[in-house]
Amino acid sequence: MNTIDINCDIGESYGAYTIGADEQLFPYITSANIACGFHAGDPGVMRQSVQYALKYGVKIGAHPGLPDLQGFGRRQIDISATEAYDLVTYQIGALSAFVQQEGGILHHVKPHGALYNMAAQSQSLADAIAQAIYDFDPRLMLYGLAGSALIQAGNQTGLKVVNEVFADRTYRDDGLLTPRSDPLALITDTEQAVRQVIHMIQQRSVISTNGNSIPLIADSVCIHGDGQHAVSFVKELQSRLEAEHIHIQPVMQTES
């Protein structure tokens, strides 16, 4: 039987600014990637997000990004491997404090935005991020782009890795995501996005923007909480996955 985890980048409001309909999304997801204050989020939002996750039985993940609130962490910043190690450690620690206070368990780490895409290609950054997670807690799982350098680094470090795929993004022939600067990067049609997800799960491949079939593993599918129609989309996705007899469940941690 095919199974899939539905994860969501969430907790991205900040101060007076509200981004996404977080509580409406939680009933339809199995894992939450909570912003840790660098690209989005703030202490109050982080705590509220943890509370929502515990209320709805959703696995809690840290979502560390580049220090770029204005650019929402989606602009590349030239950082060293040491800087990557430190900023990931800092952000995991921040969210972990709220998780501990609320009586929860930190489940995974998924880098955000530009940091995620940089680490998908740069082995040195990927290695630093994986090592930071392992040194913090080797039981944590690493979510990364399916088949990327980040997945390779997690495996080599000894972490349990989760190969992630995207419903609303297109893919290049090399298996990387099409850059957001490209007009073809985003999939805005719900039917097309749902069909892509089902294809990735059932066929273990994705069709690139050039029409080529690219092999991949789909352990978890990402929903962007800041998407304009995120709630209606995740409802439709859940319904269609169930119709295809694809079981929705979180990826479980390895017992230590």
Image: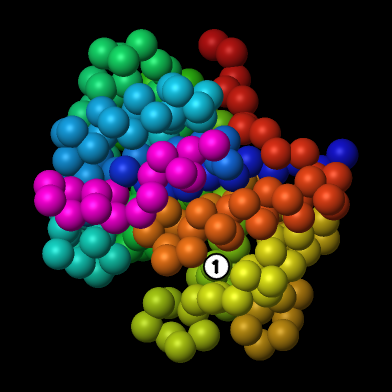
Left or right of 110 on screen, residue 164: right
- Residue 6: image quadrant is top right
Residue 29 showing in the rendered view: yes
- Mark 1 highlights which residue? 168
Q: Amino acid at mark 1?
A: Asp
213 above or below 219?
A: below
250 above or below 232?
A: above
Residue 84 x, y percent position in the rendering: 24, 47
Q: What range of the chain is rendered magenta?
A: 12-27
Residue 129 showing in the rendered view: no
Q: Residue at image x 54%, y 76%? A: 188
Residue 130 x, y percent position in the rendering: 40, 39
Per the image, is 110 magenta?
no
User: In which quadrant of the rendered image does the C terminus lie?
Assistant: top right
Residue 113 x, y percent position in the rendering: 35, 60
Q: Nearer the viewer, residue 122 or 16?
A: 16
Residue 110 x, y percent position in the rendering: 42, 44
User: In which quadrant of the rendered image does the N terminus lie?
Assistant: top right
Magenta-drawn stretch, dominant element (helix, strand or loop): loop
